[in-house]
């Protein structure tokens, strides 16, 4: 089991074809929700005032995380920060 | 209701009196766990390889968050990043 | 009640259609003034020599702030910094 | 008339004599409130989770602002960012 | 009276129409020299090896400085740093 | 299986007791070599001109990596950068 | 013998002709694998969540490394960080 | 003739002996004024809210500038930025 | 006499007309070699893995250096860092 | 043969014993000059206004460069930047 913090900042070019844009966003949402239902993408929050999310992933390995992130429909338009996490000694979870 | 991401980086001076250090760390743990039990400090993870945590707070207001952070026993030894969060449209939560 | 500092830096592409530009700026102004009259956008100042503003928002929650910022007509052309604020112990306000 | 944004980040050495600390903080508060009452220091907010404030000054000139900041009792322990402001065309104030 | 340091870094798009470019540069020069003759733009130096200048302005107020900078013919192609100045105690001027 | 890149920058205080220093460095070396022999710390190189190393770890999980790094005898004197790795599609390994 | 750490961050323009893109990526892979087989490009890993690799080169000299990097089919689309390495005193290799 | 912009940021240790401090500041002032009278240190301004100055030097050569800066009584407590300047084509000076 | 370190980072747009590109690079080379033969551009090295050079100039003055750099055929595609140098007390040159 | 650019920024603690300081500086000078005479340390310049040097080394390998830098008497008080160099195609040297 491997826990990761991922921050994704989205920057879609202003001149992207509107149909491509709409279709890509729909696929991104579906892709994300499928992983949420599978228990891999355990949290996703929007950062206030930013086209960005902060997410927590719970995966088998760094390999699986890369597979997931690399195939995000919005991957080409994103900048990412990835940090491995571990349990905190003060956590009661 | 107000959701916040907080990253805390701890830097305790190397020459801090060991008793003060031990006692402060104990108080920090107790303080954190009390807030976790109260449902205010909803997540805390350790960042791998760092004396740092990434936390999620669920509080009444920015005022309440400041009150909580300012009174952390380790506050004087920490650097913090605070980001307001909101629900993500793709979240199934 | 939740107080926020927001700095917005505007970067409109040089080749944006002049009509779109003019119309977007007019909508931005109207949108901003409506929120000022509603007491949500309590201060807005121009930073000298920059196409930027420093603003103070007084809203119900981070959720409401995000709703406001995300719908700014100029949102796609802006970079933002958002900081939660709280009362200062030295303030006489 | 001259408007300025000032962010002050405070970093008091951990080994400062507690009496000096208490006395300096008291003088800082008194100094700040006197300037607030005189209408020079028009806003002061605490940044959530930081030993920092964001302030707005309304003074005669940059010279007067420097005089005020240089004489802050905590000046030697502060890092500052100073930005001149002007009225925003969208402001209804 | 208000003194300001301004550094302007110019970045004209490589594909700007040559006539527009030539005409804008001519207007910039005329605009700058008019302000120099009026005693507002008291110094302007080129930074060696950069398409940049370091300037000193002596104006009535931050408001007047913003008015001047905002109307620079090259404003849309510039990045600026603005610092308020005051007399130095060691100056013999 | 989980692969990680770790860069460690060492900054031992100049006034550290020479005996403590020597003894800590000896324990660090022994600790590192034990992990190398166990196949966990698979590469370690010195960065030219820096008191730094670039290392590759091959561990069970982020949890195990944190356990290893947190217990480094030099941990209190180090700054670390940790990046999860995965196989590269061009690799022939 | 000379050892180098190289991090390559790839940024292929979104509007690059798909045939050119496919063909360039194929040449890059072939070029990389040839150097791996020759024992010059001794390690290549993908950084999780990034279009980036971390590589180790074992070459005759800085001159040979430059020759190799400059001729990468993707060179024009890459940003690179190059650090010379040397044996680490704790290494058992 | 050689023109230079120099920004000096002063950071005197809080525990410096008060007599040494007073005496060093007096020597700094005298040294600066001598160079101003000699026409070498042609401008010096205080940056508002900072223990910093922005200065213009008019010297024979980079060698002479270094000689001057290196011998500043406060040199050990300063961080400096040095930029060579040249005449600006828009200058009427 | 005035010595300068200059680092030039070249970034030619990917869509520049190939003939313009070839012709500009040829003029750059000729221009550089003429200045090398004149003893003004005393060293030029390529930084490994970068489209960058590190150069040493030996000129009459900052004015002459600016004249040289400003007229580089590649100037519009370069970012530069310029540092004045002086003799080092340990140098045996 | 391997060419390297090295920038060394020196930061000797203000409270270092004056005898140790003088003696260390003398050893540094002797060490540097020995390497200059051996043709390893081929250039050393002082950066104007900084306690820094920019140097060029011509060594057998990165290993030899590390050996040289690591044994600098001032090593513990220095921050370094190391860049491998190669011949420039425009160089007439």
Image (cartoon, coloured by chain):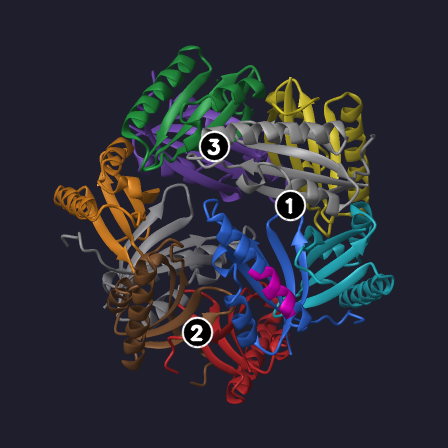
Chain colours: A cyan, B blue, C red, D brown, G yellow, H orange, I purple, J green
Local crowd at mark 1 within 10 Å, few (<14), some, or many (≥20)?
A: many
Residue toward you, G21 or H34: H34
Residue B32 belongs to the span the image colors magenta? yes
Residue at horizontal 52 percent and vertical 19 percent from the top: J67
Q: Is residue J37 above or below residue H82?
A: above
Q: Is residue B35 visible?
A: yes
Left or right side of C37 for H9 = left
Residue shown at 41% from the left, 21% from the top: J43
Q: Is residue I17 above or below residue I55?
A: below
Which range is magenta?
A: B27-35
**Residue G87 at x, y percent in the picture:** 62, 22
Circles 2, 3 touching at the beta carbon (< 8 Å)? no
Label 3 packing within 10 angstroms: few (<14), some (14-19), many (20+): some
Residue depicted at x 62% and y 70%:
A48
Question: Whole-percent x and y of residue D51?
Answer: 45, 64
Q: Quadrant of residue I34?
A: top left
Please give the chain letter of the residue carrying mark 2. Answer: D
Q: Is residue A9 visible?
A: no
Q: Which mark is residue J80?
A: 3
Mark seen at residue B49: 1
Residue underneath mark 2: D45
Magenta run includes residue D39: no
Instruction: Give the main secondary structure of the magenta stretch.
Output: helix
Q: Chain of mark 1?
A: B
């Amino acid at each position: 089991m491997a826990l990761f913090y991922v921050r994704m900042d989205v920057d879609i070019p202003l001149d992207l074809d509107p149909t491509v844009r709409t279709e890509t966003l729909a696929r991104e949402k579906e892709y994300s929700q499928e992983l949420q239902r599978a228990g891999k993408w355990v949290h996703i929050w929007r950062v206030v005032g930013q086209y960005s999310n902060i997410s927590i992933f719970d995966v088998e390995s760094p390999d699986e995380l890369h597979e997931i992130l690399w195939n995000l429909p919005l991957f080409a338009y994103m900048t990412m920060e990835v940090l491995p996490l571990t349990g905190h000694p003060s956590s009661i979870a």
